[in-house]
Amino acid sequence: MHLLLLGFWEVILTKPLKEYVQQVLAEHGRGDKIRRAFEFANFTVNALAASPTWRRKGTRRAIFWELAVEKLIELTQDDPGLFVDEHHDTISFIFDDAILVRLKKADMGLHSSNYPTPLAQLFHEHEADLFGFTGLQRIEAVYIPNQFETDIIWSGIIARDGHIPLWHFELVAPAVAPVLPLPMPAQPTAEDLAKLKNQAKDADRKKGGDGA
């Protein structure tokens, strides 16, 4: 009975919690760096494809993934809470010893592109311990390309429990306050200049009269 209760609470504690994941990814700009890594990969793959033609759809996806992973490692190299783990032909980004993130491509239904290996199928089975880490909340950072796979129309975080979607949220660029130009100083009109000139003359007369 105690073992059953323990297993139950382990599943509850490892199911991804949206607010907690958002908090962890907000630290050190992690979520924005994931978004930037996707954008870098998309730009670079498009530049590479200007000359060769990808004869297999998987070629672009594979190169995109390599570029995005490499860029994210570069962007997060100073993150004190990050551990990058290379295992089983993939890469996991583990933040604060709590959140395990993998980068994936997804379709419009937010289904990620997974080859149905046992490890891929178990990734969203949160009662299963994978990769030798326990108690980690496993999520996917995904990008959705447009019809021609030339641009990214959505990037975000997805959590599932088996085949059941739990929640998702978009990775958006941080808001930047616009830099407003300094107002130009108001130019005096001819009437204002005439009034100032007359006021100066009156002041001079008064001074002269006081000294007589």
Image (tube, rainbow, N blue to C red):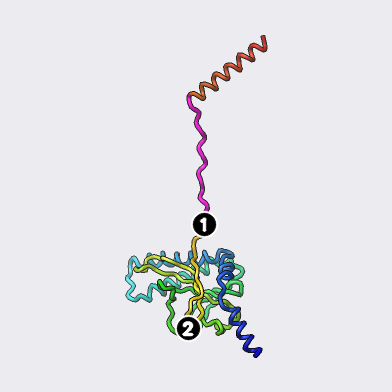
Tell me which numbered mark, 1 or 2, is placed earlier along the sequence. Answer: 2
Residue 162: horizontal and vertical position, in percent? 49, 81
Q: Nearer the viewer, residue 67 or 142?
A: 142
User: Seen in the image, is 22 located left or right of residue 145?
Assistant: right
Which label is found at residue 175?
1
Q: Nearer the viewer, residue 186 or 108?
A: 108
187 within the magenta span: yes
Badge 2 marks a residue whose secondary structure is: helix
The Cα–Cα distance between marks 1 and 2, rounded to whole angstroms, is 37 Å
Residue at 32% x, 75% y is: 55
Assess disc 2: are there few (<14), some (14-19) or many (≥20) residues with their C-alpha within 10 Å of its C-alpha: few
Location of residue 40 (image quadrant): bottom left
Residue 110: horizontal and vertical position, in percent? 44, 73
Q: Residue flagged by tag 1: what amino acid is it?
A: Ala
Residue 81: horizontal and vertical position, in percent? 61, 70
Q: Are marks 1 and 2 in contact (CB under 8 Å)?
A: no
Residue at 63% x, 86% y is: 5
- Main SS, magenta residues: loop
Residue stretch rendered in magenta on the structure: 174-190
75 within the magenta span: no
Q: Quadrant of the C terminus?
A: top right
Q: Residue flagged by tag 2: what amino acid is it?
A: Gln
Q: Nearer the viewer, residue 45 or 162?
A: 162
Which label is found at residue 121?
2
Residue at 51% x, 39% y is: 183
